[in-house]
Amino acid sequence: MQNHFPLWKNLMILMVFAIGTLYALPNLFGNDPSIQLASSATTKLDQKQADAIKAELDKAGLPIKEFEFKRNKVLVRFNNTDDQLKASDLLKSKLGNNITTALNLAPATPLWLRAFNASPMYLGLDLRGGVHFLLEVDMPAAIKQAEERAYMDVKAALRSHKIYYKSVTKEQGKIKVILKNSEDNIATQSFLNSDFRELSMTEASDAENTLLLSLSQKKQQDIREFALDQNMTTLRNRVNEIGVAEPVIQQQGDNRIVIQLPGIQDTTKAKEILGKTATLEYRLVDVEHDVQTAVKGLPVIGSRLYHETDGNPILLKRRVIVTGAEIVDAAYTMDENNSPAVSISLNGIGAKKMGKLTQKNVGKPMAVVFIEYKTKKRIVNGVKKEFKEKIEKVISVATIQGVFSKRFQTTGLGSPEEARTLSLLLRAGALAAPVDIIEERTVGPSLGQDNIDKGFNSVMVGLALVLVFMLVYYRVFGFVANIALAFNLVIIIAVLSMIQATLTLPGIAGIVLTVGMAVDANVLIFERIKEEIKSGNTPQSSIFLGYEKAFSTIFDANITTLLVALVLFGFGTGPIKGFAITLSIGILSSMFTSILGTRMLINILYGNRRIEKLSL
C-alpha cells in the first residue's frame, strides 16, 4: 500500500521524538548560583563536616535552594547571586584554607529529569563566562632535571661497578667522566651503553680517559612530551579537586596548555590552584654525617641540607630515588600498628628504582621532599620583573622496614591528618616541569549571557524566516516541514546534551547553518512531487515517487557536507571542532526528520484515502 508506514516504524519515529524532547528539556531550566566545596590538601571533607557547613548556613539565615553531598564534595545551590556571595564570605571566614571553596553555576535541572540522567549541554567560555589561562611548560627545566638525575645515576653506577674515576662533573648539559685507568675505558663504555641507552657517549678529543655523556635528542624529545602529558594530567586532577564542571584542558603547540574553566567566578582561587608548580622527590636521609656540619655552611659530599616543615634541619642524599611523576596512586591507610600511613603505587620505572635501592638500605630513613616554585615580582633597575623562587621542605621521614618496589607504605607520620595530607598531594600528581601562566582572560557572565541572547536570536530569526517561507510557498506541506524542522532543533539539542558536548559560538553558527540546510531536503522532495503531478501521476503516486526519487539527491548532498564536517573535526582546533560537531549532528538529524518525520506526517494526512488535489 502506497504512503503507509508499518506500525513499528511510526512508533520508532515517535519514540525518537519523545526521547529527544525529554533530553532537550533540561536546557530550559538555566543555572543556579552555587558554591562548591571539596577536600583541600590538609582536610578531607566528610559527612560530619558537610552537616556542620549546612548548620553554619542555616544559623546565618541564608536561604538554601538545595544542599548536596556526594563523593566528598558539597554543592550548595542558592536562589540568587547575593545569597551566593554572602554564603561564600561566611564559609571562607569559618573554614579558612581547610576546605577548598569555589563559586560556580550549577544546572537547575528538576529531580524528575535527573532521574533519567538528563542534563543540559555544557556551555563554553564564550557563552557561560569564566576564566581562560594559557600556561607555558618550562621545558629547559624538565631537561635540566633529567640531566641531574642521569648525573647522579652515572656516579652511583660507576661506584657499583667498582670503576675508579678521578671526577664526574656536569658541565653545560654534559656529564664529564674522567677515569683513573685507561684499562677501565672499554669496560666503562660497555656497561654505560648497556645501562644508559638514553645517553649519547663520546670520547673527549682533548683529554685522555675522558668520556662525555649527554641526553640523546630522542630522549630529550621524550622528556618534553612526557612533561607536557604529565602536566596536563596533574592540572586536570587539580581542577577536579574543586569539582569544576566541563573544564577544557588541551595542548597548544609543543610547550603550552590551554585551560578554560566555564562558570567559575572565583578567578583568584582558580589561579591559585593552577599556579601551584610543585613536585615531590624521595631521597635517602644521610645518617653518616653530622647535620650541624651543613648548618655551619661546610660542604658535605653527596648530601644537601634541607629543612622539615617545623624548621628542623635534616641532611639528605643528593641522589633522587623517585619523583612524584612516577607515582600512580596514593591512599590514606593504617599500618600493622594501627598508626597513620600512606599506601603508594609506582609505575614500572619507579618500581625498578625503588626495588634496587630498598634492597640495600633496609632500616635506613627515607624522606619525602615537597618542592614548589612560586613566582614573585621584584624591581630591578626601576623595572618590575618576575622571577621564580624555589621552596623545598621535607614533609615526611619514614624508615625503610623491608624491600619493596611497586607498592609500599610511608609510615612514621605524626598524625592521621598528616597522612591524609600526604596522600592528597601524591594522588593529585606532581608537575613534571614548572609552568608559567603567560596569559589570563576573564569572561564575565553578563558578556556570556549577551552571546547566548545573540546566538538564540540568530537561530530564532533564521528559523522564523524559513518557517514563514515554507508555510506561504508550500502551504500544508510547508506546515509539515516546519514541524519537522522544529523537531530537528530539538534532536540536535538533545544529542548535544546526551553526549555532554560543549556548545560555543561556532557551535551556534553550525546550528544556524543546519536550520537553512535542513529545509533543503523537503524543498527537493516537494518540488519533485510537483513535477510528478505535472507529469499526470495521481496525488498518491506523486507523493510516493517524490520521496523515492529525491532520496538519492538528498543523500549525496548531505554525505558530502558530512565528510567536510568530519575533516574539520579531525584537523581543526577547539572552536572549529565545536562547529563541526553541531553541523554533523544537524546533518544526520535533518535527514531523519526531513525524510522519515515528514513522510510519517504526510502519510497520516493523505495516506490510505482517495484524494484529488494536494495542498502544495
Image: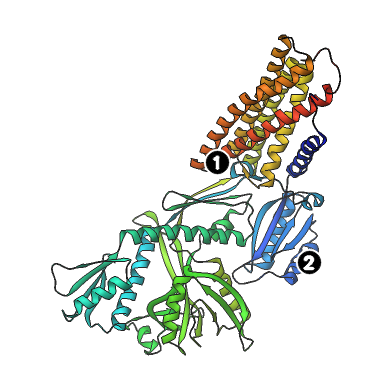
Find residue 8 and report its image quarter: top right
Closest to the observer, 320 or 89: 320
Closest to the observer, 303 or 615: 615
Residue 146 seen in this snapshot: yes
Instruction: Return the x and y of residue 537 as percentages of the image width and height.
Output: 75, 12
Tell me the SS state at disc 2.
helix
In front: label 2 or label 1: 1
Residue at 39% of width from left, 60% of height from top? 222
Q: Amino acid at mark 1?
A: Lys
Q: Which residue is mark 2?
A: 55
Residue at 30% of width from left, 62% of height from top? 216
Q: Which residue is mark 1?
A: 577
Left/right placement of residue 547 relative to residue 145 reads right
Tell me the SS state at disc 1.
helix
Quadrant where the image shows the N terminus: top right
* Mark 2 surroundings: few (<14), some (14-19) or many (≥20) residues within 10 A: few
Image vertical order of residue 597 relative to residue 154, above or below: above
User: Residue 586's mark?
Assistant: none
